[in-house]
Amino acid sequence: MIRVIQPGILTTVQDEGRSGYLAFGMPRAGIMDRYAARMANLLCGNPLAAAVLEMTIIGGSYCFESAARIAVCGAPMPLQLNGEPVEAWAAVDVTSGDVLEIGAATAGCRAYLAVAGGVEVPLVMGSRSTYYRAGIGGFAGRALKIGDLLHRGNPVPFAAAPVQLPAGWIPEYSSQVEVRVMTGPQNDLFSATGVKTLLSTAYTVSNEADRMGYRLEGQKIEHLAGPDIVSDALTPGAIQVPGSGQPIVMMVDCGTTGGYAKIATVIGPDLAKVAQAKPQDSLRFVRCSDEEAVQALRQERDRYRQVAEWAASGAVPSLAAAVAPPEMPPEQTRPTAPLQTTRRVGRKLRLHIAGKSYEVEIEEVK
Amino acid sequence: MAAMQKLEFFSQGESGLVVELADKIDLAVNSIVHALSRLIQVELVGMVDAVVPTYRSVLVIFDPLEIKRETLMQKIEQLYQTIAVGGATPTGGKTVVIPVLYGGDAGPDLEFVARHNNLTTEEVIAIHTAVSYRIFMMGFTPGFPYLGGMSERIATPRLTSPRKEIPAGSVGIAGMQTGLYPQKSPGGWQLIGRTPLKVFDPDSEEPFLYRAGDILRFDAVSEVEYARIERAVTRGEYLPQIRNQAEVVQ
């Protein structure tokens, strides 16, 4: 059992989502940053599909009422186990009564807490994901509250020692993010200038950025003959451009259909980077080919296989030496662009979560 | 049947394939959409992850490490040719009858809709229940049906300011469209009635009463009948009226 002492701002149970009901208008929901969530699962010996806690901006505080192997991956949030610092992106063995405190993100937006055996909540429509807009799935269809008690599934017995991910496999979280897109499906409804605008200028994440979608602000994207299409299917990553010319990146809780032209689609392996952006961060879109996107997906899958093997054997063989410099998804920093000053004390963000507004103050400590 | 359109393929990311038939709302086009969707689901089972039919296209979600985009396109083109050869396009859908209590608290805008169209409320009900509505696609919220076929004679603009909360089961009109709210939600539709049916039940093995490609018929019921059905639904004893064959939509 896991007892929620403090849940953070928005902590929900998520897994790979429910894709079986898209044709019925049911959003997929599920983990926003699949790379971090899956790594957390693999590090504690879980299958990719196990349910985890997705924490937003602030982690919270959790008491483990039985021994367990756990891992926290994603946006850097200071971790303390019974007051002692512990590593993220690493398996950690906890014992009964241990308290894990997870602080505010110093960069990025979301982190994942996985526990061996997975967070056990009832399957609703084939998934444990919370779709809180409709009050469906996860823990009582809602974000976690103080005092909630979460069961966990029966863990696969692990004899292996806990392992830590090599540093090169841990993404760097920056306020300037570059993501790869494939143009389409409706790039032909935009002028050449419009497509060029999307691919050559930076967009700022607005305050309206949540699990449903990220509204961006920047140079107006020009349509050829208006933004409206006969509604068709939406998927996470699709970039809709309404009449304002300001793009919206669809995220995992997005509706299944939409009526604005989609200029491009963020490739699956890079959607995690969007998920880690927060209001006022800057996004740049870079065109990539179908082949490059499939190659990126292959590399991503290879990593999961590799980490599953490490976790099962309890060893990461000759870390730095054995691991070729990764091409994705760590390089979140644009090498050519100067880094934005990170010393911004008391940065205030307004977040809209589940219909409520929160003003959050974030102190960047470095 | 309309002449067969040529299929167009577009990418929606590395795992999304848009199979487009047209860019209009059209019953014949939509019939082919649903026929093709079903063929893809049946014939390419195990090769695709999800199939989403829309007004005028089919989105196929696939794993590009399992099947190449080009291979998938070829297979879908072949399936499409079997429809072309067959000529007629049965969607394989069913007809679901939705009992509705019109007017009163259940349909607070019925009188406005009648006035707006110079009709009596009885005439609005008669017109609304006379038609077989095709579910062109589902979206907006879980279980929300985009219906085609409503008579122009009862078309009514949306409310100028949307309601904060509309009860689940509300049946409404917005412009040329009619539909029903599967869950309580905010909304700007003119509400003409309400069904006691639970058209979306996430805890059920079959969470949705209908699917895209099916036909909905609305059936006016009395308050007494509404209450009876509502009790039966609560006890899990209500058997919805479902006909296996989709009615011919004119």
Image (spheres, coloured by chain):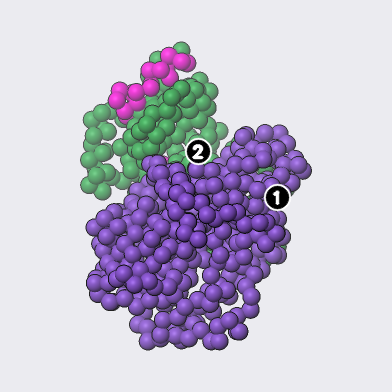
Chain colours: A purple, B green
Q: Amino acid at mark 1?
A: Leu
Q: Is residue B248 visible?
A: yes
Chain of the residue displaying label 1: A
- In the rendered structure, which amino acid carries the disc numbered 2? Tyr
Q: Quadrant of residue A114?
A: bottom left
- Residue placed at 30% from the left, 57% from the top? A6
Identify the residue position indicated by label 2 in the image.
B146
Numbered badge on residue A199: 1
Question: In terms of depth relative to the viewer, which is nearer, A287 or B190?
Answer: A287
The image position of residue B100, as x and y in percent, is: 34, 32
Picture coordinates of residue B134 (x, y %)? 51, 38
- Image quadrant in which you'd find residue A44: bottom left
Residue B238 lies, with reference to residue A62, above or below; the image says above
Chain letter for the residue marked with disc 2 in the picture: B
Q: Position of residue A19 (x, y in %)?
A: 48, 57
Tell me the element at label 1: helix
**Residue at position x 50%, y 42% in the image:** A208
Helix, strand or loop at mark 2:
strand
Q: Which residues are magenta?
A: B91-117
